[in-house]
Amino acid sequence: MKKALIITLLLIVAVFAAIYAFIYYVPISEGYRSGELIKFSHKGVIVKTWEGEISQGISGAQIFSFSVLDKDVDIIDKLKEYQGNYVKVTYVERYATFSWLGDTKYFITEVTKEKSPHVRN
């Protein structure tokens, strides 16, 4: 009886670990987006995550929402600095997410400041 309980608990832990590893390490897609960084915040009640939005249209009708992992301090600092500017981001899309990682399935891996195509010199 004790042996069956231990094996069952180990199987449950192994299944949870496999699901977590799959969601965390296997991206469904990778890509680039650019637009005006209109929002970047550290939000949450129990677990705080970094969340942001990029406007990809002149009227703000097309919004790209994204998350940034806490370990990516350099990306967080750049996004704070680039608030209100035109940026290009590299992202990975995951199958799902956990609440302690972020609100979206899109996670930023790189950010650069770009010249806005809407402003002519």
Image (cartoon, grey):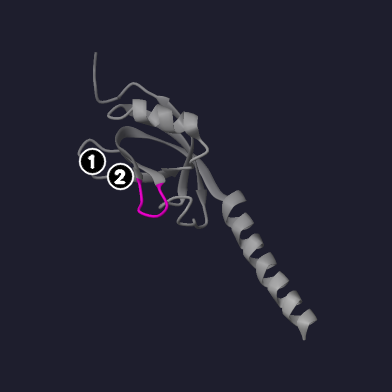
Name which residue lies at 41% across and 27% down.
Answer: 78
Quarter of the image that includes the N terminus: bottom right
Instruction: Kindly give the residue lying farthest to the left in the view shown.
Output: 59
Q: Is residue 63 visible?
A: yes
Q: Nearer the viewer, residue 37 or 1?
A: 1
Quickly name the residue at label 2: 63
Name the side, left or right, on which 27 lies relative to 54. right
Name of the residue lying farthest toward the right? 3
Check contact, mark 1 vs mark 2: CB within 8 A. Answer: yes
Is 85 situated left or right of 109 in this image?
left
- Where is residue 51, by image quadrant? top left
Q: Please tell me which residue is depicted at 76% across the width and 75% down the height of the picture.
A: 7
Report helix, strand or loop for mark 2.
strand
Q: Which residues are magenta?
A: 43-48
Which image quadrant is residue 119 in? top left
In the rendered image, residue 100, in percent from the top left (x then y), is placed at 47, 53
Rendered location of residue 6, percent (x, y) = 74, 75
Q: Amino acid at mark 1?
A: Gly
In magenta stretch: residue 40: no
Task: Determine whether, in the image, residue 119 is placed left or right of residue 17.
Answer: left
How many numbered badges does the structure rendering display? 2
- Does the magenta portion include 46? yes
Q: Amino acid at mark 2?
A: Ile
**Residues packed near mark 2 inside 10 Å, few (<14), some (14 to 19) or many (20 plus):** some
Is any atom of residue 110 visible in this view?
no
Task: Name the mark on residue 60.
Answer: 1
Front residue of this view, candidates 4 and 20:
4
